[in-house]
Amino acid sequence: MATVNAETITQIVLAASTGGPDKRVRKIMTSLVQHLHAFTRDVGLSEAEWAEGIKFLTRVGQFTDERRQEFILLSDVLGLSMLVTSQSNEKPAECTEATVLGPFYTSDAPKFANGDDISGAASGDPCFVSGTVKGPGGRPVPGARLEVWQADDDGFYDVQLGEAANARGIFTSDTDGRFSFRSILPQSYAIPHDGPVGDLLKILGRHPWRPAHLHFKIEAEGYERLITHVFRSDDPYLDSDAVFGVRASLIADWVRHPPGCAPEGTILSVPFYTLAFDFILNPVGGDR
Amino acid sequence: MATVNAETITQIVLAASTGGPDKRVRKIMTSLVQHLHAFTRDVGLSEAEWAEGIKFLTRVGQFTDERRQEFILLSDVLGLSMLVTSQSNEKPAECTEATVLGPFYTSDAPKFANGDDISGAASGDPCFVSGTVKGPGGRPVPGARLEVWQADDDGFYDVQLGEAANARGIFTSDTDGRFSFRSILPQSYAIPHDGPVGDLLKILGRHPWRPAHLHFKIEAEGYERLITHVFRSDDPYLDSDAVFGVRASLIADWVRHPPGCAPEGTILSVPFYTLAFDFILNPVGGDR
């Protein structure tokens, strides 16, 4: 019988776990056990600290339901999501960079025609977004599927409020690769912080705020899928995003306009905003 | 603005997390983020694999309730629990070694007098356990509080069945340090494996069995708390405990007896077992 102690346990666990059929799973689990044990040894984790960790993860589990994904939030605030996003989406400098998906994506958003208003019941200043989906060298990509989602004026996504889709929709780029829609001006907001992840941020001396942004998920045949945000250039949290998602190339100016004639021919009695942003996709099999 | 990418993200997260007041928490979280990120880089974790991980942890959370602690099970099967137990309980060779607490401990077990039968509604062959709680050099420890718990014949603990306490109780060692009780013969059993931890074991090519054992938690003034098991020497799973809890010094012989006069003067019409096991506690501030 092998002698189990603080030195031998890692090799004993690994030796016991070599029987699985999937080589990739074995590689992942071997590395995970090694790093998990190394962390535990490095800090000399005590039994009380281990129990706190179990309690914390149990609370994360209890906070997770159909409206709230506390495990993704945890991954986000530890920079894990952004690390995975970064290492999985290396591409030529010309292409639009990726950032985190976040916990508020839904796969069943309603479809709209270009120019439509997606804001629904979400409150906020009117905002008109337009741009072109391109490939390398600027060639337009027609027929690209664009999914867009954002928070309302109060910083909440429709899924957090248990509502039908608001400020969320799916578009298709036209023959010139162009897309356009009306929505609302995004505002900076705090990620949900009334749970264990919020407590963790407090303990780490961090705030829960994210700079204002629009989410995009763009798919087109022959191109790599792009999941990204566009951030407002005037936001005070650009340098301290709670989930580390900001990349300089994704920051853009929302232009404020006085009441009057808006894009799509709409006449507005209130000020409104416009954003123009083009996305450049990386061809499948393209340079990295 | 710092450039966020797969190389810089770790330092950016750590730099953002230095504001908390608790030095120990900062040390733990710094090491955790470093190891978590190093693991993610080492295996080149993909977005799909990350999503599988989130799904797995979400399921672990969903399986965890008052009767079942799937996070502790996960820690157990990854050898994390045994590592923490080992590094937290180093003591002189003479002392009884510690092993994992497991997920089935409850703090509200009923109190019994020495010699009492704790089996209640739990089925199994009668078993009489006795021994002495000692300090170094064999001096008896009177007034020690012993908590004992075990699974029934079918491998289930009372808490798993949602029952009142069965095969679980609290004793106090007498003036000679002695304790004794009647219970049932422990059997090897499978840890709960109808959930995500069971799926993980399958993927790793591992079985869910634990060798038969009794749990003890022993506390006495002036001594370090001891959490341990006593394992049956004839068990086929001693070398492949699903949670890596077996230590050679904790293996003992349960002696089988024909029907007749059992300890405490009981006359039994069925065969019964006896176990004699002494525990040697480490004084607080004793050698390591």
Image (tube, coloured by chain):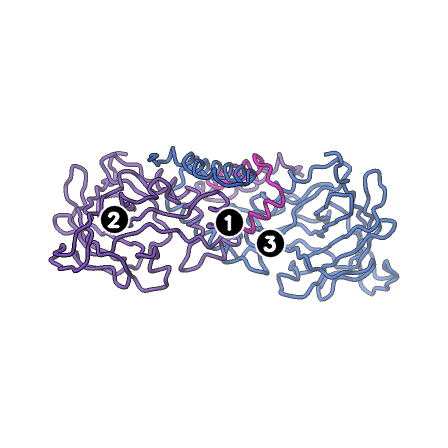
Chain colours: A blue, B purple
Q: Is residue A177 left or right of residue A31?
A: right
- The foreground one among B231 and B140 is B231
Disc 1 marks which residue? A200
Assign a secondary structure to mark 2: strand
Can you give x and y, in whole percent of width and height, for residue B265 in the image? 11, 58
| Chain identity of mark 3 | A
Disc 2 marks which residue? B218
- Name the mark on residue A23: none
Can you give x and y, in whole percent of width and height, for residue A117 in the image? 79, 62
CA gap, disc 2 to disc 1?
34 Å
Sort mark 2 into few (<14), some (14-19) or many (20+) by Cα contacts within 10 Å.
Answer: many
Above or below — where is B150 with respect to B136?
Answer: below
CA gap, disc 1 to disc 3?
13 Å
Assign a secondary structure to mark 3: loop
Magenta segment main secondary structure: helix
CA gap, disc 2 to disc 3?
45 Å
- The foreground one among B249 and B5 is B249
Q: Amino acid at mark 1?
A: Leu
Above or below — where is A111 with respect to B8?
Answer: below
Instruction: Tell me which residue sits at (62%, 64%) in the image.
Output: A161
Can you give x and y, in whole percent of width and height, for residue A199 in the image? 50, 52
Q: Where does the C terminus of chain B fall, quadrant-wise? A: top left
Q: Where does the N terminus of chain B fall, quadrant-wise? A: top right
- Name the mark on residue A191: 3
Q: Nearer the viewer, mark 2 or mark 3?
A: 2
- The foreground one among B144 and A17 is A17
Can you give x and y, in whole percent of width and height, for residue B42 in the image? 56, 34
**Marks 2 & 1 on one chain:** no
| Chain identity of mark 2 | B
In magenta, the rendered stretch is B27-56
Q: Amino acid at mark 2?
A: Ile
